[in-house]
Amino acid sequence: MRDEERSAPEIGILLGSKSDLALVRKVEEVFSFFGVTWEISVASAHRTPEDVARYASRARERGIRVLVAAAGLSAALPGVVAAHTTLPVVGIPVNAGSVGGIDALLAVAQMPPGVPVASVGIDGVKNAALFAVRILGLHREDIAARLGEWSEKEKEGVRSVRKELGDLPCPPEDVFS
């Protein structure tokens, strides 16, 4: 893909409110690593539903390939987005209420037939970003190649923690080989 073709955002992220912004900052590391273009905005399924509908229905023609929607409480945003597009939609249930995000998780996971939304765990922004990247990797070889690098980086992160355990009683390292 040429650079000028990639300048349009490939991933569009919608947040249900400003309070979700700090959580979504975690996508920057993932998207930078893979060279993915993205954009982010705030639109409410309840307060500005017409904005959500316009954004979702125009996303494909703008070059967006995957939509991500983060919302808490009733978590209607991912479903409203999916109702107005044929693009893949990833819902991020946000821990925003008194029940620790379970309400949002259930809302995102229980879409009616014909309104598909993939769901990640509560506050699962990093997984949502990686899932969106894997979707893009189906058609972009540069991303597909970097997915292996990302996995190795994650493995090394876990292995380095074992080395930091220091004086604690640990099994010999060869039990992991």
Image (cartoon, rainbow, N blue to C red):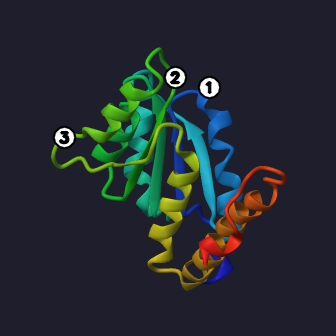
Judging by the rendered image, the residue that carries numbered circle 1 is: 19
x, y percent for residue 121: 45, 43
In the depicted view, which residue is nearer to us: 94 or 121? Answer: 121
x, y percent for residue 17: 55, 27
In the depicted view, which residue is nearer to us: 71 or 153? Answer: 153
Residue lying furthest left: 113
Q: Quarter of the image holding residue 23?
A: top right
First-in-chain label (2 vs 3): 2
First-in-chain label (3 vs 1): 1
Separation of disc 2 and disc 1 at Cα?
Answer: 9 Å
The residue shown at (64%, 52%) is 27
Q: Which amino acid is tagged 1?
A: Ser
Considering the image in quadrants, where does the C terminus appear?
A: bottom right
The residue shown at (45%, 59%) is 66
Separation of disc 2 and disc 3 at Cα?
Answer: 23 Å
Label 2 SS:
loop
Judging by the rendered image, the residue that carries numbered circle 3 is: 112
x, y percent for residue 153: 70, 69
Q: Residues within 10 Å of mark 2 (few under 14, many from 20)?
A: many
x, y percent for residue 113: 15, 46
- Total count of labels: 3
The residue shown at (61%, 71%) is 175
**Mark number displayed over residue 96:** 2
Separation of disc 3 and disc 1 at Cα?
Answer: 27 Å
Q: Which amino acid is tagged 2?
A: Ala
Q: Is residue 129 left or right of residue 92?
A: right
Residue 104, placed above or below residue 174: above
* Residue 84 seen in the current view: no
Q: Are marks 3 and 1 in contact (CB under 8 Å)?
A: no
